[in-house]
Amino acid sequence: MDVVNIALPKGRLLEPSLAVLRSAGVPIPPAEEWGRSAVIDLEDAAIRLFIIRDDDVPTYVIQGAADLGVVGKDVLMEAEGDLFELFDLKEGFCRLVVAVPAHLQEDYKKRGSNHLRVVTKYPRTAAQYFRRVGVLAEIITVQGSTELAPKVGLADVVVDLVSTGRTLRENQLVEVEEIARCTARLVANPVSYRLKSDRIWPLVEKIREQVDGKNPGGEEKCGS
Amino acid sequence: MARGELLPDGVRDYLAEDAERHRYLERELSTVFKRWGYAEVITPCFEFYEHLQAGVGRRVLENAYKFCDNRGRILALRPEMTTPIARVTATSLAGGQGPWRLFYLANVFQVQKEGSGHLHEFYQAGGEILGVPSIGADAEIIALAVACLDQLGISQYKVGIGQVAFLRSILADAQLSQEEGEAIMHCLQERNLVRLERTLRATGLSGEEQNFLWEVLTKHGNGSFEAVLSNLLNQVGEKAQEELLQVEKLFRALAAYGVEDKIYLDLGIVRNLDYYTGVIFEIYGPGLGHPVGGGGRYDRLLANFGRPLPATGFALGFPELLDLCVSQGTLPPATATDYLVIPEPDNYTAALIKARELRREGYRVEIELRPVALDQSLEYAAQRGIREVILLTGDEIEIIPVKKND
């Protein structure tokens, strides 16, 4: 039997991903048993899991090192390349938004006609969004702590992921637009999807049964 | 210029073994094409951008290298070969009698995403039949692609066969608006099944109709081709039935070619070039993240060059073929010089006569040109993989086997 390689993201989506796979019958032992290892071989099930940085998941899947992967829609929208977006796991819901300092709330778009400076971890998605709404924007990419950027003069506005909105409030930022609603997605390499369809489809169907109707929400809004 | 920036992004040199592998592919593939009666076409690396635009979609064009000639006209490096072949056939071959069977071995140029691991200049082999509208041509093209893989000893792969005309027919039959139909095709091209499901749900089709489309568009190659086909035939309109019967004919023809164990029906295949109009296919190899190649029918492309002609063809990527040859262990061993001949000091004549003799027999022979000790010559020979050293002294000829150097 072909081994199915599945890439899972470190961080907030790891637990929900493991839970979904377990509920679909993948016999993943408790975390204590695999400890610090980033590769979990489930020999009897002919499945191998790797746990990697979330923004590397699309790369592993696109290149075919992983047949399947779980990744947030926010990360997926940034990835360029060929993969199947198979299924919405409806876990890890959060929103990608434009936020501005409170005093700019009214006229940030007008400033945009004279070049808006946007700081973000999501340069591709942010650039696409501002192009679509017709705002001239200079995208500045950072790896984290986006919310500090307006305060220290790095940018006028931020594009970032929010779940509760607390970080924004604490930094005197106000959400002005929603770019996308993001949940975890099951993705597949296009060749694996075909050559290993006899393994992948039953798994996807089981996951679908578990997820459907259990957890509404997570509609996709962005056309990326 | 700084060291380490000797080459632009995405191009490479092919040295010794890599060059040999490259030529091996060219040799083997052109042998297959010629055996099947295909004539080679060599077209220029760059053409008028306007002409290349006639064929390919926006994404390919955006990633083409463009520049100007001395008269300010926009040129582009060819991003693929089908459009140049269509141009040649519609113009240079316009006076002749078809059909035409053409092949090419060519480098094409596309700027790739940074960090994707793909070269911007890569080589392709491809074949096209122009002037034949019938399914027999599609069958020959697929069988020829399979013959190319066979010639290289590649045995692990699958050919997925789809039919875009059928997809368009069932979308039209479902009474979807043009926008809805396009949105659905777009989801398939982007391989976004999450959005596909939502798009279907938003159409106002009945649950049953939605389900039917979902099954056809996403359940790739499940079940035997006969079962899928007979099941589908009862559920679709007349036009779609015709398209399916074409597929049935194609499968029967391919069985006659003896390749039925390599093919499967996969109606969800849509390739990302916009010119396809009928049967399309992709070839997948294990361990390779993207298809080895593929192709299909493009009956409207030549009309862009003023001569409507039906056509079908395929291309295979050299890097992908080599990856499969390596992973399936089918590459012939690298070759090396057979003999290093060491002349007597100040008397080359005997050595040159010996070398000429051996070369005439087909051996690869090098002459030691340096006045060095035998040890050093042996070391050089070992390093280059030369099997034997021939030492000439007076009338003596000594053959010394070279110890392999790992």
Image (spheres, coloured by chain):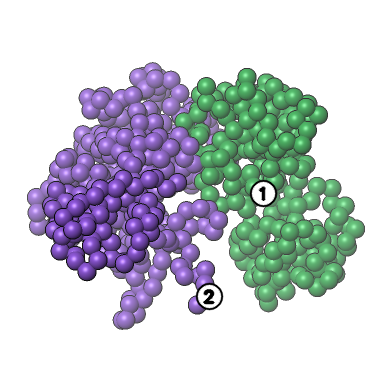
Chain colours: A green, B purple
Can I make out residue B87 in this image? no
Q: Nearer the viewer, residue B205 or B380?
A: B380
Chain letter for mark 2: B
Residue B163 x, y percent position in the rendering: 36, 36
**Where B352 falls versus B27 (above or below)?**
below
The label shown at residue A55 is 1
Residue B16 x, y percent position in the rendering: 35, 55
**Where A75 falls versus A170 (above or below)?**
above
**How many C-alpha atoms fall within 10 Å of the one at disc 1: few (<14), some, or many (≥20)?**
some
- The residue that appears at 34% across and 70% down in the rendered structure is B75
> Distance of mark 1 from mark 2, alpha carbons?
32 Å
Q: Secondary structure at mark 2?
A: loop
Label 1 vs label 2, nearer the camera? 2
- Which residue does the numbered mark 2 point to in the structure image? B2
Q: Nearer the viewer, residue A5 or B255?
A: A5
Instruction: Specify the amino acid type for callout 1.
Output: Asp
- The residue that appears at 25% across and 25% down in the rendered structure is B258
Q: Nearer the viewer, residue A85 or A39?
A: A39
Instruction: Pick out the residue farthest to the right.
Output: A170
- The residue that appears at 56% across and 35% down in the rendered structure is A67
- The residue that appears at 30% across and 38% down in the rendered structure is B152
Residue B293 x, y percent position in the rendering: 37, 43
The label shown at residue B119 is none
Quarter residue B291 falls in: top left
